[in-house]
Every structure is written in structure tokens, then in C-alpha cells.
Image: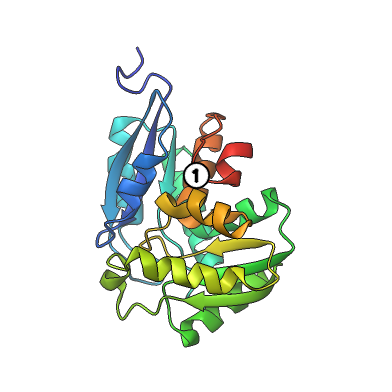
Amino acid sequence: MADTLAPRAVIGVMTPAMNTVVQPEMDLLRPSGVTNQMQRFRLGGDQVSDDLPQEAAKLMDCNPRAIAVGLTTDAGPGGPDKLAARCGEVSKHIGVPVLGASQAGYAGLRALGAARIGIVTPFNAEVDAVVKANTKRAGFHVVAIKGTQAPSLPAICETPLDDIRAVFQQVAASDCDVILQVGTALPVVALIAELENTHGKPIVACNAAVYWQTLRAAGITDPIPGFGRLLEAH
């Protein structure tokens, strides 16, 4: 029998333990007949997270059809590829698709036919240089990048919305045609429609992108209105 509250699908959502943004943002995006079920993990180790496989295995007790990992690793050397490899290992072990937010962001850019990329981050200029290099290595032309310069990882969750709007304004003033946002603790999802209307450019926000890709992997193809062009049209 189908889950009474999730007759269409249970979606697993995993996030670093300190991240208080992923869960409410992905709940905003949930289609009718779908529920999100959470599991947290700790960052660290040579493979992004030592306990990710064990925590994902626990999450399988509620029978998710696919799992979204609310984490971007764009700020580390080789980070996106490392996260993709880790998600692939976990997926093979538990038997359902496991999608990470970094590669989902890239998939969103490709779906929108992006050519010139602007990037918004929660980081400082030094870390932004790493994000830019990783994004270029993935095959994208980066024309602008700017961070909110949060002083610590926990502080990213506390970033005022007006600070986020100001950084998007700076990046949108470039000749980019799509804006990518990285850093899953930066609260952007509720602003996507507003920012797209203001600046006239599509936005690929990492939490929205990984939830979009996870829904599609689970066979849920509904347009999700109110959260930007990617989720409405793809």
C-alpha cells in the first residue's frame, strides 16, 4: 500500500548537521502527494563525510524513492567531483538515486542553456576564486562572482535577506545570462521568483536545483510554480 501522506513518493533529504536552511527550503518546493523525510550527517574526512553512508542507510527505513543531499562542495579543490563520487557510492550501496547539490546546479545550468554564468556565494573573495575555478573546470564561462562574506559556516544561515538581494544585484549587473547560487545554508529559495522578476535572468539556486533533480529522478515531473524558470519549465 502507498504511504497515506505520500501516495506519490517519499523523498529523502540529507543535510549537514548544522544546516538549518535545507529542510525548510525543500519543504517549500514539495509537490502534492510527496513528503520529505530528513536525515543529518557530519562533514569531514577524506570523502566529504565519513558517516554519510550510514545515515543514508538509516533513511532507507522510510523507503524514499530518491535522496537529495543538501550540500555543495564547490569551495574545495575538486569538491564537486568528490561529492558526486561519494553520492554515487552511496547510491550503489542503498539502491536508490542520491543527488548532490553541486552537480544538480550544473545540471540546472545546462537545462537552461546557460552560456555566461554569474555566481552568488556565501563566501569571501579568496574562497570565491576556488568556486570560480571549479565552475570553469565543469565547462562554464564565469563572467561574475560575488559572495556575502559570511564569517563562518553557521553564520551563513543567519545572512539577512537584504544582504542576499544586494549581492544578486551586483552579479546581475554583469553580462551573465544565468545566475548560479552555491552554498546550501544561504537562504535563497523563497527569493527566486522575486529576483528573477527584478533582474530578468534565471536563477539556479542550489537547494532548488537538487530538489528538482531528485524529483525528476523519482519520476515526479510536475512543474513547480513560484520558484523560478528551472522548476516551472523543466
Element on which disc 1 rests: loop
- Quickly name the residue at label 1: 227
Whether residue 234 appears in this view of the structure is no
Instruction: Quarter of the image for the C terminus: give it.
Output: top right
Q: Residue at x 59, y 62 (%)?
A: 179
Indicate the position of residue 52 as horizontal and vertical percent values: 34, 55
- In this rendering, position of residue 55 left or right of residue 218: left
The answer to whether 70 is drawn above or below residue 179 in the figure is above
Instruction: Quarter of the image for the N terminus: give it.
Output: top left
The answer to whether 29 is drawn above or below residue 203 in the figure is above
Whether residue 28 appears in this view of the structure is yes
The answer to whether 39 is drawn above or below residue 76 in the figure is above
> Residue placed farthest to the bottom in the image?
126
> Residue placed farthest to the top in the image?
1
Q: Nearer the viewer, residue 73 or 158?
A: 158
Q: Residue at x 25, y 62 (%)?
A: 18
Indicate the position of residue 113 as horizontal and vertical percent values: 73, 53
Q: Residue at x 27, y 67 (%)?
A: 158
The answer to whether 232 is drawn above or below residue 134 in the figure is above
What colouring method underlies this structural image?
rainbow
- In this rendering, position of residue 159 left or right of residue 232: left
Q: How many marks?
A: 1
Q: Nearer the viewer, residue 34 or 176?
A: 176
Indicate the position of residue 24 as horizontal and vertical percent values: 31, 47
In terms of image quadrants, where is residue 67? Answer: top left
Indicate the position of residue 185 as horizontal and vertical percent values: 35, 62
Residue type at the position of mark 1: Phe
The residue carrying pointer 1 sits among few (fewer than 14), some (14 to 19) or many (20 or more) residues within 10 Å by Cα, namely many
- In this rendering, position of residue 199 left or right of residue 184: right
